[in-house]
Image (tube, rainbow, N blue to C red):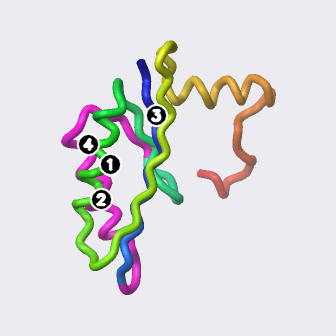
Amino acid sequence: MTATAFLSVSPKVEGSMAPEIAKAVDALDAFEVEYETTPMGTILEAQDVDELFAAAAAAHDAVDADRVGTFLKIDDKRTVKQAASEKVEKVEQHLGREARSGGERNR
């Protein structure tokens, strides 16, 4: 089984959220998840949903703010083992190119 998720932790703070988001991302290292942080959230990948829930809860708890909104969207493929990168590769095969716009602004 492969479970992937999109995690977005949004602390209500004055100024930049980056220091608190860094705490949330750092908390993920204590779990058996692979992750990639994007400008809008973090993609998680684990062997089961229990590990995703535990990692997301730890990320949420790591934030020091009076108010924190956390969004977790899970894709639990129960009959097929497929890495998150494979999902992107399949889309790119249909596109016939990378699934991103070109140019230096993406690097």
For marks 4 and 2 on the same chain, the one whose residue lies earlier in the sequence: 4
Q: Marks 1 and 2: in contact by CB < 8 Å?
A: yes
User: Three-letter amino acid code at disc 3?
Assistant: Thr
Callout 2 secondary element: helix
Crowding near the residue tagged with mark 1, few <14, some 14–19, many ≥20 C-alpha atoms within 10 Å: many
**Residue at mark 3 to residue at mark 2: CA–CA distance:** 18 Å
Query: Which quadrant does the N terminus fall into?
Result: top left
Residue 44: x and y in percent read: 41, 39
For marks 4 and 3 on the same chain, the one whose residue lies earlier in the sequence: 3
**Residue at mark 4 to residue at mark 3: CA–CA distance:** 13 Å
- Give the vertical position of 37 relative to 61 (above or below): above
For marks 3 and 2 on the same chain, the one whose residue lies earlier in the sequence: 3
Residue 4 has which mark?
3
Residue 70: x and y in percent read: 40, 60
Crowding near the residue tagged with mark 2, few <14, some 14–19, many ≥20 C-alpha atoms within 10 Å: many
User: Three-letter amino acid code at disc 1?
Assistant: Ala
Residue at left offset 62%, top offset 31%: 88
Q: Which residue is mark 4?
A: 54
Q: Which residue is mark 1?
A: 56
- Give the vertical position of 13 relative to 23 (above or below): below
Q: Which residue is mark 2?
A: 60
Q: Marks 1 and 4: in contact by CB < 8 Å?
A: yes
Residue 34 colored in magenta in the image: yes
In this picture, which residue range is highlighted in magenta? Answer: 14-36
Residue 101: x and y in percent read: 74, 48
**Residue at mark 2 to residue at mark 1: CA–CA distance:** 6 Å
